Amino acid sequence: MILCHKRKAIRPKEKMKLLPYEHFKITTHLGGDEAVRKLEDAIQPRRLIKFVGTSQKPYEGEFDGSHFEVTRIIGYSNSFLPLIKGDLGLNNGGCSISVSMRPHALVIAFMSLILIQLGFLFLALLISFVSSLVRTEAADPIPFLGVCGMFALVYALFFGGFKSEAVKSKEFFQELFAVDQVEELP
């Protein structure tokens, strides 16, 4: 939960997330019509050709008045750019916006395949390393450590590429809706 006090956010300690996924609920004092207007001002329809013309809006996608599916418009390439889905709901004296962010399904599948293969290679090298220790032969830990390093690097690229963009989008939505409260959802 993030509480804003005079434009300064008070952030409690966040739990370390192991998967590139964000889900949170924004509560704001803005009315439903004003929240819809702000979203309409921030979202443009998807363009087929990305490099034609400049965009005046920060997000592109679809918005039907209560549900939106968007991605941030960036001037560089990032395969881990979050797909952002959200739903607006009215509550007492304001509205709430439930937002979830995740990488594209093909990116998740591709990165999972790479990480699974590295995991199997890790297990094979670990079994080989342990069996050579049991036979009292000299065991070389370098291949084993190399695979650990490759796994860590691929995971860091995957998670870091997603997280850097997710943080920007989360801050944008908090600013856009003049946030009263943000609740992290499981």
Image (cartoon, grey):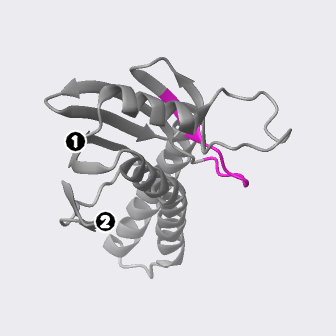
Q: Label 1's element?
A: loop
Label drawn at residue 87: none
Left or right: residue 33 compared with residue 106: left
Q: Label 2: state its secondary structure.
A: loop
What is the magenta range? 69-79
Q: Residue furthest right?
A: 52
Look at label 1 and name its amino acid: Leu
* Tag 2 residue: 7
Q: Nearer the viewer, residue 24 or 163?
A: 24
The answer to whether residue 53 is left or right of residue 43 is right
Q: Residue placed at 72% from the left, 55% from the top? A: 76
Q: Give the residue at mark 1.
A: 185
- From the viewer's side, name the closer residue of 15 and 127: 15
- Say whether residue 86 is visible: no
Q: Is residue 63 visible?
A: yes
State whether residue 125 is above or below residue 40: below
Q: Residue at the bottom extreme? A: 138
Give amino acid for label 2.
Arg
Quadrant housing the N terminus: bottom left
